[in-house]
Amino acid sequence: MKDFAVRLTDRPGELARVATMLARYGVNLKSVAALAIDGQATVHILPDDAEPARAALEKNSIPFEESEVVTVLLENRAGELASLSGKLSEAGVNLRAIYVTGLVDNLVELAVVSDNVERARAALE
């Protein structure tokens, strides 16, 4: 699974522009997360299929960073994120993004984007 981080300016319509372009290429999103700080915004998209997302961004000259995602299921209870982030820290893994991709019963699925996918995967097994 791939995460696409797209940097945008923090102004009205930027997300709509990217979302419309992705829709034109038939890109279905499993999850999305965005944050704006000090005039810069970053949107992370997790498409069902990476190929059309990559093609859409490239053909429209939209800069992006593509990363492999480690998904993990956690119980929906206090302390789970602390445990997960502690394991990553002990493995020397730096987080680039983490966001919810699904909820089922008492489980939360997270997408973890890190600086070292192999170490992250090993730490979270």
Image (cartoon, rainbow, N blue to C red):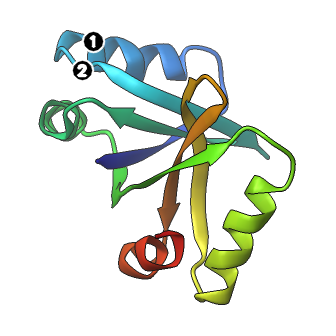
Image vertical order of residue 99 relative to residue 84, above or below:
above
What label does residue 23 carry, if any?
1
| Residue of label 2 | 27
- Using residue 87 as the reference point, say whether residue 55 is left or right of it: left
Circles 1, 2 touching at the beta carbon (< 8 Å): yes
In x, y percent, where is residue 62? 32, 39
**Residue 9 visible in image:** no
> Toward the viewer: 75 or 33?
75
Q: Going 20% across and 39% down the picture, which residue do you hit?
A: 50
Q: Residues within 10 Å of mark 1 (few under 14, many from 20)?
A: some
Instruction: Provide the secondary structure element on which disc 2 rests.
Output: loop
- Frontmost residue, 42 versus 124: 124
- Please indicate whether residue 108 sits to the left or right of residue 7 in the image: right
Q: Residue at x 60, y 51 (%)?
A: 98
Q: CA distance from mark 1 to mark 2?
A: 5 Å
Residue appearing at x 61%, y 22% in the figure: 105
Residue 35: quarter of image: top right
Q: Give residue 90's position: percent from left, percent from top.
A: 67, 88
Tag 2: Cα neighbours inside 10 Å, few (<14), some, or many (≥20)? many
In the depicted structure, whether residue 72 falls above or below residue 100: below
Task: Say what amino acid the circle numbered 2 marks.
Answer: Val
User: From this viewpoint, which residue is outermost toward the right?
Assistant: 78
Determine whether, in the image, residue 48 is placed left or right of residue 16.
left
107 or 100, nearer to the observer: 107
Between 97 and 80, the one lying in front of the other is: 80
Q: Which x, y percent locates residue 2?
A: 30, 49
- Residue drawn at x 62%, y 47% as measured from the top left: 74
Amino acid type for the residue under numbered disc 1? Ala
